[in-house]
């Protein structure tokens, strides 16, 4: 953890604290002479990773410094965006090595580092879209998730980003819908819209969202997602998908079930439901994705056995 400057510290100390010891040339010249800057670079006390950008330490750069270098090396108005901004804002599980930058469409790129992916924006509202207190400045959470989804490598990756961002409560569905409403030409708009709707309905992961889409495709009743229940031992647990009227549960097993303790916890939950006489179906996430017809037929058969007229 970096030590917060004392109240009597200089403006430079606070600037270096915020920018993780990275300065633009203009910022450096406000506190040092040109000769002093050249001397510090020449003797190795400072690094000059890009034209007009300095790191005031000789040690290798960390991720925070890499983001600041990328932003300060760009033209005015450059911010981190997409998955990079979401990582800054606290998103877990979607770290990316490359740095995504968003620049106004009207400015020229000056000296972008090789590990940076540049995107252009015709619409970048300085109030609604830019979080200028970010470190470095970044797009707001709602704009970040829309951009991350439209820049994703696949529809499934886009759905996963939306589901994770909303499930981790970095942003709410109304804010994402507001961004979609005022942005034109969004790639994957239908995919993002449906992913937001699914997350708002309780889907906290990509497999759950895929299962919900499968139910829609098969004309099945809409299940409730992430339903809270108390077991006979008083523990509160969450059911992935519940067809409440028919007492049919569907559990989607993801990678966490490679952990024996997690798998046993789910077995206990399933056994408690069976004791009550309710039907429990279990599917690995890969089956929902790769064998949807088989999954759909199993759910349809369970619902019919429970009284669904079909």
Image (cartoon, grey):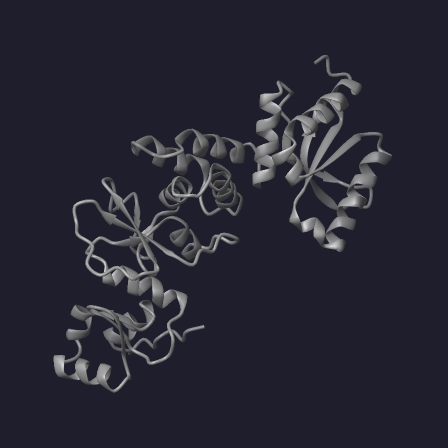
Quadrant the C terminus occupies: top right
Q: Quadrant of residue 127?
A: top left
Q: Position of residue 189 (x, y in %)?
A: 39, 31
Q: Is residue 23 above or below residue 255?
A: below
Residue 138 screen position, x and y as percent: 33, 53
Image quadrant assignment for residue 69:
bottom left
Tag count: 0
Please state the horizontal and vertical placement of residue 247, each as a whole percent of the image: 76, 26
Q: Quadrant of residue 26?
A: bottom left
Left or right of 7 in this view: 156: right
**Extreme residue toward the right, this view:** 275
Which residue is drawn at the image coordinates 22% and 61% (left, top)?
Answer: 111
Residue 202 visible to the viewer: no
Query: Among all residues in the image, which is located at the extreme left?
Result: 34
Left or right for 266, reference 115: right
> Residue lying furthest top in this view?
309
At horizontal 34% and vertical 76% (from top left) the residue drawn is 5
Asked if residue 231 is positioned above or below residue 14 in the image, the reply reads: above
Q: In front here: 165 or 288?
A: 288
Q: Quadrant of the N terminus?
A: bottom left
Judge whether residue 229 can be spotted in this image: yes
């Amino acid at each position: 953890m970096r030590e917060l400057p004392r109240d009597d510290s200089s403006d430079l100390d606070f600037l270096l604290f915020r920018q993780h010891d990275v300065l633009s040339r203009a910022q450096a010249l406000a506190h040092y002479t040109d000769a002093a800057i050249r001397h510090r670079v020449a003797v190795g006390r400072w690094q000059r990773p890009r034209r007009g950008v300095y790191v005031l330490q000789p040690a290798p750069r960390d991720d925070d410094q890499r983001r600041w270098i990328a932003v300060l090396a760009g033209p005015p108005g450059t911010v981190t965006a997409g998955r990079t901004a979401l990582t800054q804002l606290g998103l877990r599980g979607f770290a990316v090595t490359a740095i995504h930058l968003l620049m106004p469409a009207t400015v020229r790129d000056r000296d972008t580092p090789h590990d940076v992916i540049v995107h252009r924006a015709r619409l970048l509202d300085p109030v609604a879209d830019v979080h200028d207190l970010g470190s470095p400045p970044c797009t707001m959470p709602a704009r970040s998730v829309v951009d991350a989804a439209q820049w994703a490598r696949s529809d499934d990756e886009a759905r996963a980003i939306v589901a994770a961002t909303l499930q981790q409560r970095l942003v709410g569905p109304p804010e994402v819908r507001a961004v979609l409403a005022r942005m034109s030409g969004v790639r994957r708009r239908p995919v993002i819209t449906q992913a937001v709707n699914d997350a708002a309905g309780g889907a906290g992961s990509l497999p759950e969202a895929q299962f919900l889409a499968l139910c829609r495709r098969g004309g099945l009743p809409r299940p409730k997602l992430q339903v809270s229940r108390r077991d006979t031992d008083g523990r509160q647990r969450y059911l992935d998908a519940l067809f409440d009227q028919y007492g049919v549960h569907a559990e989607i097993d993801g990678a966490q079930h490679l952990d024996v303790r997690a798998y046993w916890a789910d077995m206990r939950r399933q056994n408690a439901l069976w004791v009550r006489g309710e039907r429990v179906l279990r599917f690995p996430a890969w089956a929902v994705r790769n064998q949807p017809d088989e999954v759909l037929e199993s759910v349809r058969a369970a619902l019919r056995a429970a009284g669904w007229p079909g």
